[in-house]
Amino acid sequence: MTDVGTVSADVQGRLDQFLGAVELVDVRTVAVSGELTAEAVVKPTDVRFEVRTGYRLEDGGRLLIRYNASLAVLGEEEKQIANVGTAVVLILGGPINEVPDKAVMELLAGEPGLMIVGPFIREVFQSVVVRLGLPALTMGLFRAGSHALNITFRQDD
């Protein structure tokens, strides 16, 4: 995704123009998964978080941006103890006749898009982690210009 500090005024202007002509139609969670990968529940020590995006233009002029997010929960010695995943689709309508160029789409999927779908991703991760029997986790806010999250687990000791 494009770093907010490296965006040209031209790309930002084209994104602003595109956003002025479309509307947010829906945000849908379309997939949820969770799996314990350790034989016994152990104390989590860290996580690895990743988001991948893709997009397509539907017949009828709706733009779908899909966010595939994964969270690997790690124990001691960086050993993976659980996987959590979700897919969230951001739907924009207009009608939209053509997909903006790659630079505009990367910026759209990165900044405003991630800020919109972030709460949906956060809710799935927090809920599934608890359902797997792990300590509750707290995820920080998705911040503009950063794809790193502050994630902590509740300590019961």
Image: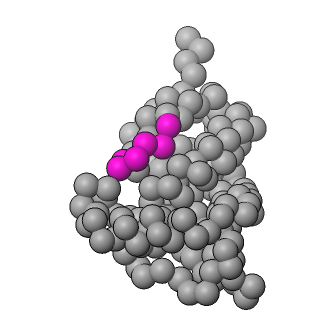
The residue sitting at 49% across, 64% down in the picture is 109
> Which x, y percent locates residue 86?
65, 57
Magenta stretch prevailing secondary structure: loop
Asked if residue 129 is positioned above or below residue 87 in the image, the reply reads: above
Is the C terminus in the top left, top right, bottom left or bottom right quadrant? Answer: top right
Query: Total number of numbered labels?
Result: 0
Foreground pick, 52 / 99: 99
Position in image of residue 116 (x %, y %)? 59, 51
Q: Start and end of the magenta stretch?
A: 141-146
At x 67% / y 74%, what residue is drawn?
94
- What residue is at 37 percent from the left and 67 percent from the top? 13
- Examine the rendering and report whether any part of residue 83 can be seen: no
Q: Relative to the observer, which residue lies in front, 39 or 90?
A: 90
Task: Name the quarter where the N terminus is drawn.
Answer: bottom left
Residue 106 quadrant: bottom left
Which x, y percent locates residue 50? Answer: 47, 56
Q: Quadrant of residue 57?
A: bottom right
Q: Position of residue 147 (x, y in %)?
A: 40, 50
Horizontal arrangement in the rendering, residue 125 relative to residue 111 (left or right): right
Kindly tell me whether residue 20 is visible in this rendering. Answer: yes
Q: Residue at x 63, y 28 (%)?
A: 135
147 or 132, which is in the foreground? 147
Q: Is residue 142 above or below residue 8?
A: above
